[in-house]
Amino acid sequence: MFSTSHLATSGAIAQVHWDAGAQAGVTKRFAAGADPGAPSPGFGPSLELQGHVALVPMVRVGAYLGTDLSPASPDGLRTFWDGGLHLRVTPPLAPWPWRTWLFTGFGYSFADDLGAHLPGGMLEVPVGLGLGRKTSTHVLLFAELGARFGFGFYGRMYDRAAVETSGETPNAYVGQDTFALSLSVGLSLEE
């Protein structure tokens, strides 16, 4: 039989006032508008830091900062540095010590083709879901499946003419990074 004191204790355990975490994983970028025969972006490693504070119960706002490498050129890697605002909604769908959440946000990504040194950038909207398990009072081990939607592209990396005329030999235009899919694991400290 449940008592009101049991419910109050469970609610207090589930309430998170702030969190800060780090995660590592793999990201696959998908490009649109590439030249025929251009290399398709491959799987690359990714890292991200994020932190949130409670806005109301089950809703936290914060920021993220991350990077990923995207092999898409025989000349080298493309690198992405991104950051922005983050919103996390944590409905109580799983029993203690498990936790689930949905996230979204809005940010900016700086990109550079390391082989041809063609910088560029875009705006992005990250979305995804997470599943975590408390390993102690203040530590959460988690996995996230995420996606990023890119738009508002600018710079030489996303300028077909600049890419094709860079270097001693013509380079193929890889396209615009309109979508990325990632899977990561991480550790978060919570209070």
Image (spheres, grey):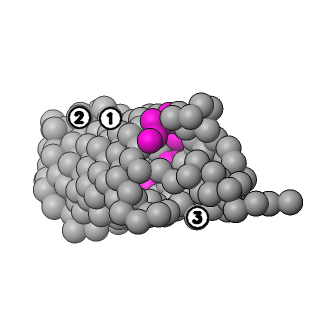
User: Picture coordinates of residue 187 (x, y %)?
Assistant: 50, 34
Q: Which mark is residue 91?
A: 3
> Comparing marks 1 and 3, which lies closer to the viewer?
3
Q: Main secondary structure of the magenta part?
A: strand
Q: In this picture, which residue range is highlighted in magenta? A: 180-191
Q: Given the image, on which type of amino acid does mark 1 rest?
A: Leu
Q: Earlier in the sequence, mark 2 or mark 3?
A: 3
Per the model, the C-alpha gap separating discs 2 and 3 is 41 Å
Q: Are marks 2 and 3 in contact (CB under 8 Å)?
A: no
Per the model, the C-alpha gap separating discs 2 and 1 is 6 Å
What residue is disc 1 on?
77
What residue is disc 2 on?
114
Instruction: Determine whether the residue tagged by mark 3 lies in a helix, strand or loop.
Output: loop
Q: Given the image, on which type of amino acid does mark 2 rest?
A: Leu
Q: Quadrant of the N terminus?
A: bottom right
Q: Residue furthest right?
A: 1
